Image (cartoon, rainbow, N blue to C red):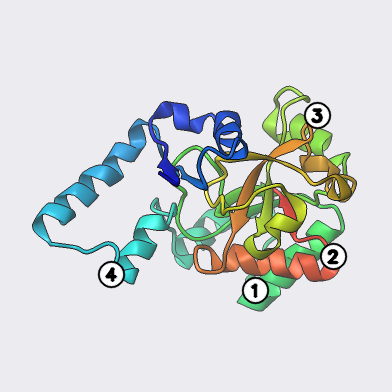
Amino acid sequence: VKNLVISGGCALNVTLNGKILSNKIFDKIKVPPAPHDAGCSIGSVLSYFYKTKNLNFQEDSKVKSKIMSPYLGFKYNDDQIMNILEEYSDYINFESLKYDDVIEFAAKALAENKIIAWFQGRDEIGPRALGNRSFLANPSNEEIREIINKKIKKRELFRPFAPSVLAHEAQNYFELDQASPYMNIVAKVRENKKNLIPAVVHIDGTCRVHTVSENLNKKYFDLLTKFFEKSKIPVLLN
C-alpha cells in the first residue's frame, strides 16, 4: 500500500501526521480538512450521492474538485458586508476596491509588516484558517509573532504559527514531498530558509505547512504571488 488516508480526531495531530510521512512508510498520506466528527456531514452526503446518483469520482473532475475544497461554509455578498461596515463606520474607515487593487493593497501592507485580517469567499470547514478567514503577516519579521500573540490570539508565546506557501514553491522551503492543502502536516523547514521565514519556524525547526494552489483558492494564491513579487518570499504567516 503506497497511500494512506487518515481520519478521525487523531488525524488533527499534525505532528503525528508529519512523523508518519517522514518515516517513509507510505509515499503519500491524505487527511481531509475536517477529519473529526464534523467531517461526518461530508461523508453522509457523499455516501448518499454515491448510492443514488451513480457518481464516478474518478471520472467526474467537477465533483472531484468540489470534494477537495475545504471552503464549504457561509458566504456573504457585497451588500451584507457593506451593511456591517456602515454600522461600524464611526470606528473604521473603508473603501471599495477592484480585485487587482485589493491584491496590490494587501500585499504592499504585508510587505510593510502590517497585519491583515483576510476575509473572502466561504468559511472553511474544520479547525484551520485556510486563507478565507485568516490573520496574515510577513513571515520574515520575527517580532510579528509576539505582536499577534499579544494583540490578537492572546495565547502563550511559545505556540507556533503556520506558513501558507505557494504550492509550486513548497519543496524549496520545506522537507515535504506532497501537497498539504488543509494545514494538517508538520514538516521540517529547510536549513537555508529558516532565516528567511523566522516567524513561522517552531523551536524544533518545523512548522505546520499550508500549500496554496490556484485551483483551490485563486484569490489567496494571487495574494501570495503578489507578496512573492514584492518580498522574494512565497510564504505568508497564516
Q: Are marks 3 and 2 in contact (CB under 8 Å)?
A: no
- Give the CA distance from mark 3 to mark 1: 39 Å
Q: Are marks 2 and 4 in contact (CB under 8 Å)?
A: no
Identify residue for label 2: 232
Left or right of residue 51, residue 202 in this image? right
Residue type at tag 4: Glu
**Residue that appears at 56% across and 54% down:** 179
- Give the CA distance from mark 3 to mark 2: 24 Å
Q: Earlier in the sequence, mark 2 or mark 1?
A: 1
Give the x, y percent position of residue 1: 40, 43
Q: Is residue 167 above or below residue 226?
A: above
Q: Earlier in the sequence, mark 2 or mark 4?
A: 4
> Does residue 201 appear in this view?
yes
Left or right of residue 72, residue 209 in this image? right
**Residue that appears at 46% across and 32% down:** 11
Residue type at tag 1: Leu
Q: Nearer the viewer, mark 4 or mark 1?
A: 4
Residue type at tag 2: Lys
Identify residue for label 4: 59
Residue type at tag 3: Ile
Q: Nearer the viewer, residue 82 or 146?
A: 146
Q: Nearer the viewer, mark 4 or mark 3?
A: 4
- Rendered image quadrant of residue 233: bottom right
- Rendered image quadrant of residue 69: bottom left
Give the x, y percent position of residue 159: 72, 27
Q: Nearer the viewer, residue 230 or 202?
A: 202
Q: Earlier in the sequence, mark 3 or mark 1?
A: 1
**Category of crowding for the residue at label 1, using alpha-carbon neighbours closer than 10 angstroms: few (below 14), some (14–19), many (at least 20):** few
**Residue that appears at 61% across and 49% down:** 210
Identify residue for label 3: 203
